[in-house]
Image (spheres, rainbow, N blue to C red):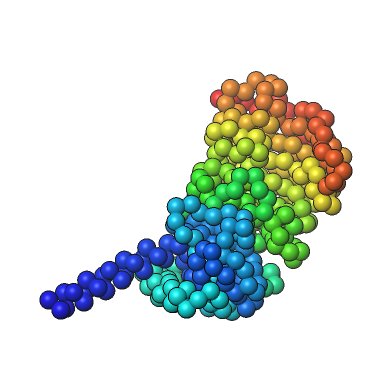
Amino acid sequence: MHVSKLALGFAAFALIGTASAANRPSGYVTICSEGKTCSVDATTNVAFGRADKFFYKSISGSFACNEATFGGRIAGGVNECSVPSGSASSSSKSSAASSASSSVASSAASSAASSKSSVASSAASSATSSNASVPIPGWTGPVNVCEPGALVYNTTLDCGGKRIGLACAGSSETQPAVMTVINATLKNVVIPAGGGSDGIHCGWGSLGNGRGTNVQGGTCNLENVVWEAVCEDAASIGNGQKGTVMNIKGGSAANASDKVFQNNGINSTLNVDNFTTTGSIGKLSRACGDCTDNGGPRFFNINNVKMEKVSTVIGVNSNYGDKATLRNVQIKGYKVGSPKVCVTYVGVQKGNGSSSSIGEEWNSASCDVSKTDVTSY
């Protein structure tokens, strides 16, 4: 009987640990709960949330573990603040009770981590050991793992269809990236509805999210990525990232009220091939109309795209020398002029008013597309 009770006790503890682990990302350790004051010793990528959904923010020093700090919260229970395991962080400065809770959470996180597959464990280990070599000074978040908030750098990462998401605060551009990709390929990811946040950042910096000025561009390949419902944008090139190339191969996106892909980088290129959109889409892509240090040219190559409902396929700034090339575009119920395919605008500097539309163009310097390139289905 004694052994039986002991076994039941261990089983109960394991269940508690597993449930608790859902309130922090894999490889993270809780340092305090919602409403408490936490402290980290150095700039750290802190997660705030519960039930496998999180907001992320780079923080140093003391901070309040609450919605005001992170710009949102996950409804349905108490949110937790957590940091990467092994990062240079101190525990909560709230009370002895919260310290004890942090200790239990740490044990639970370790228990949960040990139950992951050997591949995931290996990847997490690689992430911890490679932080020093990434191109972003002070980066303490996960690296080259299929987890929300991770940096994918100088590698090919196949997530095997894993669902990876954060939360969604609508059109807010201060939301964190679901993942950041620099000189790397990210494959086979599903970003769930309600978890799209600011999408995938192709490169780092100058995206309006308070992440600093350490701008990194390079090449970003997104293969077979599915956005079940776009939040702010599906994927973006920041306006400080000159010469960045974002390649979209396969995949799909649904219900983007504004745009699917954002290209703000001067001399940057967006290539989209074999992509599908469903539901209502504002635009497939748009060159930034009113960025800080706005300019061009920016380039867009769209091929073999099938769209269910879209207001405008693409918008470019002719005064900055932008160019869009479109081939093999299918739009449900399309008739010439409805919807518009390639629309030119006058881009402006931030604070100098709004970007104004010139109109739809065919076979022009800005819009390399003929009416035979667009068909109805």
The residue that appears at 68% across and 31% down in the rendered structure is 312
Asked whether residue 362 is in view, the answer is: no
The residue that appears at 56% across and 30% down in the rendered structure is 308
What quarter of the picture does the C terminus occupy?
top right
In the depicted structure, whether residue 375 falls above or below residue 282: above
Taking depth in this image into account, of 154 and 145 the one nearest to the observer is 145
Provide residue 216's location: percent of width, then percent of height: 72, 63
Does residue 305 appear to the left or right of 120 in the view shown?
A: right
Provide residue 225's location: percent of width, then percent of height: 54, 49
The residue that appears at 68% across and 50% down in the rendered structure is 173
Taking depth in this image into account, of 339 and 82 the one nearest to the observer is 82
User: Residue pushed farthest top?
Assistant: 335
Asked whether residue 293 is in view, the answer is: yes
How many tags in the picture? 0
What quarter of the picture does the N terminus occupy?
bottom left
In the depicted structure, whether residue 73 falls above or below residue 342: below
User: Residue pushed farthest left?
Assistant: 1
Provide residue 213's location: percent of width, then percent of height: 76, 64
Provide residue 289's location: percent of width, then percent of height: 79, 42
Taking depth in this image into account, of 56 and 140 the one nearest to the observer is 56
Taking depth in this image into account, of 175 and 319 the one nearest to the observer is 175
Does residue 170 appear to the left or right of 364 in the view shown?
A: left
The residue that appears at 56% across and 76% down in the rendered structure is 93
